[in-house]
Structure formats: structure tokens, C-alpha cells
Amino acid sequence: MATRKSQKALLMLLKNKEKAGDSVTLSEILKCTKWRKSTFDTYWNKGRLNEFINETKSGIYTPLNISRLTESEFSRLLSQSKHRQELGHTCKSRLAKALLRKSRDNMLLALELYNRPSLDNRLDSFVLCFCVAWEQLLKAMLIEKKGENFIFKPKYNKNKIRETISLRECLKQIYQNDDLVRKNLEFITYYRDQAVHLLMPEIQGQISRFFQSGIMNYIREFECFSKQQFLSSSHAGLLSLVGDLKDPDDAILGNRYGSEIGKEISYIIKELTIESEKYDDVRFAVPINVRLVFAKSDKEGDIILSQANDGMEGLRNAIVVEKPVDREKTHPYRQKEAICEINKYLNEKYKETDLEHALISRNSNKQPCINGYDFQAIIHKLKWKNSNNREHYMNKNPECHYYSEYAVEEIVKKIINDVLFVSRCRDSYGNQKKKIAR
């Protein structure tokens, strides 16, 4: 068969090159196999050749462990009918490929350790393996983007092993400061560095929410980078969110671990609860509370179902169910108070010269600001008053409108991101009032 001859010729070429310590060029491979370049590209893009050659420069490849293979083994591994791809087949760097493999192994180990209920130290074991897996994945990504030398510190003793950059430095290179994937990982890394000795079973109910988000973030980044699944679809699950979600009493913690340590563990539990509610985003901490709402309008609470294979986007779109909470906590601002908060944020975060173009109204000191008319125009444009939602809540008797912290932040964001936002809102609101007057 012609295919058999081409594979045999390629094997001989690669063995001779590896024995001589030489690289092989694309033109040599095409000449030897009598392949078209499109044939080579098919093998390469599907990861069939990555176990045998590594691309060092464009069109130049280094043979890899080819001398030990027999003709039948080589033919079987290269066969197009065998649907397989080596992990890291998209990596040009052998170091990046090795780090990617180790990263997956360490994350699998982290999951296996966490899911063993008999282990008393499974939280701290998980955190250590979890952070190592993330660091190896991020370094593989940086190597492919900026080269192998980028992950090593510039100054080192030649008689010692070179030191690499830290996990936190990797995060700075890949994610923005406000990225919730970064915040989640920095949060867990803090406990690895500063409080791993306090990761007692009592905090599992709260911290597992951060772990689950970190796992889902990892899988998304892993699959995006490697172009392969982290686990096959036959696997039932990842991380078991099992534990007592009720916060233990301070007195019980004091009896178990002593007064001082008990107080520190209690503080950690409270901190985890506060942090998980700060962002309300599955990329930072998985929501576990549930609220069921029966409503005619989609905006007022139709239930959304999401399957696990819908990934992060599906989970984000799924319903957030939580226990009913006090309106004073969720929507604390009347209109006047909301306007004050918006102006406060704008003046604290941005220069007056930046606000002059975005804001039309001026206060008594002739400074740019949001006034009552602007606020009503924005609310009208965003249609928040049409229902009770995350931004707006209406008390029926007596009728009174309240706004959330999220609404304040959202308005500030829209003003800054779009210099004409307020102007367009005012125009739309003015036109609507004219129509009503007619």
C-alpha cells in the first residue's frame, strides 16, 4: 500500500535524524513520504504527528523518541482511523506540553483527594494540588505566548536550578485586576499561603463554593488552551459539594480547637460568607441558595434550566435560588440616595475633566453630576421600573421605589463606558414625555 510505504519511509527518516541529532525540515518530510503539504497539515492539525516530532521553528522539527518504535507501532499510532490526539498537540514548546500534562494530573489528584470523605486533611491537600495545577497550566500558556525564558526569573545562580515566577505573577500576566477568575484563584492562594493550617472540616460548606468555581474556571481555560476535554463525558462528576452548610457555633469551635484558634476559624467562615456574596458570580463562588418565583413575565422569575454540559455560560444563565431577604439589604436606596451614591462613585474614581463630556447637569458648584431628571431618564431607558428585579424594587402600599447597590454600579459603568449614554437617555425620556403630553 502507498500509505504503508510513506509511513515506513517517514519512520526511517525520523530514526536517522534522531540518531544523528539533527532536525528534519518540512520539505524533507514531503519529499520522503511523497505527501502533499495538505496531507501533512491534516496529520499535524489532528495531532497525529506530535508524538514523533516537535516544531522548533517554522518548518523545522525535532524527532522525539522515535528510535524505539517498530513499523507496526508507528503505523498504528499514525493511523487516521484511530481518533486520538496527544495532550498538548497544539504546543510548540516541549516544556509547555510537559507542564500541561502535569497540570491535568495534579488537578485530577486534587479532585480525588477532596472526594475522599475519610481524609481529615482533604481541604489542605486539595488547595495545594489545586494551586500547583493552575500554576503549571498558566506557565504553559505563557510559554506558548511569550517563550520559555519568560517564566524564569532573570537573575539566578548558575550553580543552582533556575527559579520560575510565582503563581500570582502568572495571574498578573494573563488576567486583568478585576477578572473574577483571577480573584477566585488569588482568594484560594491566600489560604494556601497564610492559613492552610486553619482549613478545618467546619469551613468546608462555605469554601467548597470557591473550590467549585475554581475547578470550572480551570476546565474552561484548560480546554480552550489544549483543544481537548479535561475529562471524558462518561465521568459522572467533579467535586462533591457535600458538607454541613450550617455555620458551627463559636463555642463548639472553641471546645474543639481552643479559644484563639476557634475564633480564627469562625472569622474565616464569616469572611468566606461575606466574600461569596460580594460578587454574586459563578466565576468567583458557586451560589447555593435558591428562590423559586412564579411569574407571568420572564423578567419576574421564570425558571431557567441548564444542563451540566452547557458549561460555564449555561450555569451563569441558570436560576440563582436564594432565601428571601430583607428589602433594606438588597435595595437600600431611594432615588435621592441612589443619586448621591452615583455622584460619589463618579467623583471618587474619575477626574472632573473626564466627566464633563459624559454628564450634562451641573451642581451648585458648577461640577458635572447626575440629577433627578437624569436618573429618571436612565431608569426609563433601562426599563428597570417595569418589574421587581436585581436593580429595582417597588413597595406597593404605599408606592415607593427602591434601588440596589448593583443598580448604582451599573449606572456608573454605563456612564463611563459610553460618553453619550446620559444624553441618549435624556432624549428618549423627553420624547416619551412629549408623546404622553399629546
Image (cartoon, helix red, strand yellow):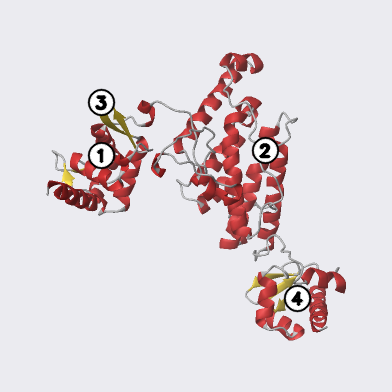
* Residue furthest front as drawn: 296
Residue assigned mark 4: 22
Residue assigned mark 2: 126
Q: Residue 398's mark?
A: 3
Measure the C-alpha gap from mark 4 to mark 2. Answer: 43 Å
* Three-letter code, disc 3: Pro
- Say which label, 3 or 2, has the lower sequence index: 2
Label 4 packing within 10 angstroms: few (<14), some (14-19), many (20+): few
Residue assigned mark 1: 343
The residue closer to the viewer here, 349 or 227, is 227
* Three-letter code, disc 1: Asn
Q: In front: mark 1 or mark 4? A: 1
Residue placed at 65% from the left, 77% from the top?
59
- Say which label, 3 or 4, has the lower sequence index: 4
Residue placed at 81% from the left, 81% from the top?
9
* Three-letter code, disc 4: Asp
